[in-house]
Image (cartoon, grey):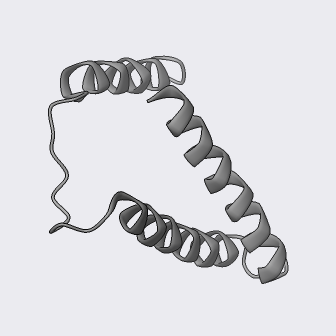
């Protein structure tokens, strides 16, 4: 069971990506692409910073958590731009 569940989750995610890739349209009411990306990334950084900081039971400094989250989101954005 400890091996079957992660394998099933990975297979489900691969299937979900294969079925849904390219079959959606993002509606942002005419906002420029850069504005949407900045707003989305800002929301992600703020939410993830607070969530991870609380998950760590405030043992780490909020600034260190924020720097970590910013680095992770920046690398995710750059990888996404490179791949897609």
Quadrant the C terminus occupies: top left
Q: Is residue 6 visible?
A: yes
Q: How many marks?
A: 0
Where is residue 2 drawn, in percent x and y?
Answer: 54, 24
Where is residue 59 drawn, in percent x and y?
Answer: 83, 78
Residue shown at the point (67%, 46%) measured from the top left: 75
Horizontal arrangement in the rendering, residue 82 relative to residue 14 (left or right) = right
13 in relation to 41, above or below: above
Q: Is residue 59 visible?
A: no
Query: Would you identify the image quadrant in which residue 29 lies?
Result: bottom left
Query: Would you identify the image quadrant in which residue 50 lies?
Result: bottom right
Horizontal arrangement in the rendering, residue 81 relative to residue 12 (left or right) = right
Q: Which of 75 and 33 is in front in this view?
A: 33
Residue shown at the point (15%, 31%) measured from the top left: 23
Where is residue 21 drawn, in percent x and y?
Answer: 25, 27
Residue shown at the point (53%, 18%) measured from the top left: 3
Q: Nearer the viewer, residue 51 or 41?
A: 41
47 in relation to 20, above or below: below
Horizontal arrangement in the rendering, residue 5 relative to residue 78 (left or right) = left
Residue shown at the point (22%, 29%) measured from the top left: 22
Q: Nearer the viewer, residue 63 or 30?
A: 30
Where is residue 53 drawn, in percent x and y?
Answer: 69, 76
Horizontal arrangement in the rendering, residue 46 relative to residue 17 (left or right) = right
């Amino acid at each position: 069971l400890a091996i079957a569940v992660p394998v099933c989750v990975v297979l489900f995610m691969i299937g979900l990506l294969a079925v849904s890739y390219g079959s959606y349209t993002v509606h942002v009411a005419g906002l420029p692409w850069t504005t949407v990306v900045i707003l989305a990334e800002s929301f992600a950084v703020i939410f993830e910073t607070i969530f991870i900081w609380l998950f760590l039971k405030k043992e780490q400094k909020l600034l260190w958590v924020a720097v970590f989250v910013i680095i992770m989101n920046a690398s995710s954005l750059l990888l996404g731009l490179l791949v897609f």
